[in-house]
Amino acid sequence: MLTDHHEVLAGRAAAGDRTALNDLLGAIRPDVLRRCARFLPCYQDAEEACQDVLVQVARHIGGFESRSRFSTWLHVVTANSARQTYRSLKRRAVEQAHDVLPVEPADPRTTSVIAGSRLDLLEALDRLEARRPDLVAPMVLRDVCQLDYREIAAQLGIAEGTVKSRIHQARADVREYLLAV
């Protein structure tokens, strides 16, 4: 759980304090890893996404503007990184399947109900993003990152009512896809 101390470290890191940045990265790693594991069913994949988040934070902390809390900004970076890691892994699996003998890779849906449902959700989000990218971030921030509507509105720079509407539309679309799977 991120605290006010993390917010202070983030402010100092954004101002160029390298020691604060190192302290911040060490302090947020467990929370980032836990959040990545909410998306990705394989722990090693969650670790890969976590490392990507930490790299992104280190690279872009200077651009962090204190118009929202650091924790909210971090949720956005984490969600985007976990989804990008999933896309990369999916793409690699398809490429590798063509490079070796025609052996079908194991389908996590048949090995774990939790893994399968996470993959189905990621597929539904990818499908939604291709058609309505404006709906994805509000739903992910609410339903996966568990931010409140006010935080989401501040992070995305849209009205709270718009956030609620987009979440409603996204859930309807994702529900329709998941029922068809």
Image (spheres, grey):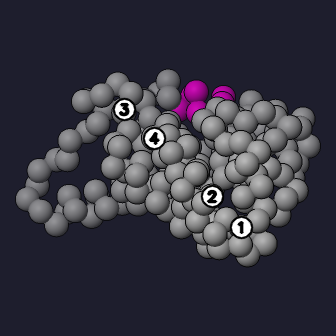
Res 110 visible: yes
The Cα–Cα distance between marks 2 and 3, rounded to whole angstroms, is 33 Å
Name the kind of residue labelled 1 in the image: Ala
Name the kind of residue labelled 4 in the image: Ala
x and y percent of residue 43 in the render? Answer: 35, 43
* Rendered residue at 66%/52% (across/down): 74
* Rendered residue at 40%/57% (across/down): 48
Left/right of residue 156 with respect to residue 34 in the rendered view: right
Which quadrant would the C terminus be assigned to in this image?
A: top left
Which quadrant would the N terminus be assigned to in this image?
A: top right
* Rendered residue at 71%/42% (across/down): 3
Q: Which residue is identified by label 3?
A: 116
Q: Quadrant of residue 116?
A: top left
Looking at the picture, does residue 143 appear above or below residue 90?
Answer: above
Residue numbers of the magenta segment = 171-177
Query: Are the residues at dot 2 and dot 1 in contact (C-beta closer than 8 Å)?
Result: yes
Q: Earlier in the sequence, mark 2 or mark 3?
A: 2
Closer to the eye: label 2 or 3: 2
Closer to the eye: label 3 or 4: 4
Left/right of residue 168 with respect to residue 116 in the rendered view: right
- 172 within the magenta span: yes
Left/right of residue 134 with respect to residue 125 in the rendered view: right
Name the kind of residue labelled 2 in the image: Leu
Please give the label number shown on residue 13.
1
Q: Earlier in the sequence, mark 4 or mark 1?
A: 1
Local secondary structure at mark 1: helix
Q: Main secondary structure of the magenta part?
A: helix
The Cα–Cα distance between marks 3 and 1, rounded to whole angstroms, is 38 Å
Query: Are the residues at dot 3 and dot 1 in contact (C-beta closer than 8 Å)?
Result: no
Q: Which residue is identified by label 2?
A: 24
Q: Which residue is identified by label 4?
A: 37
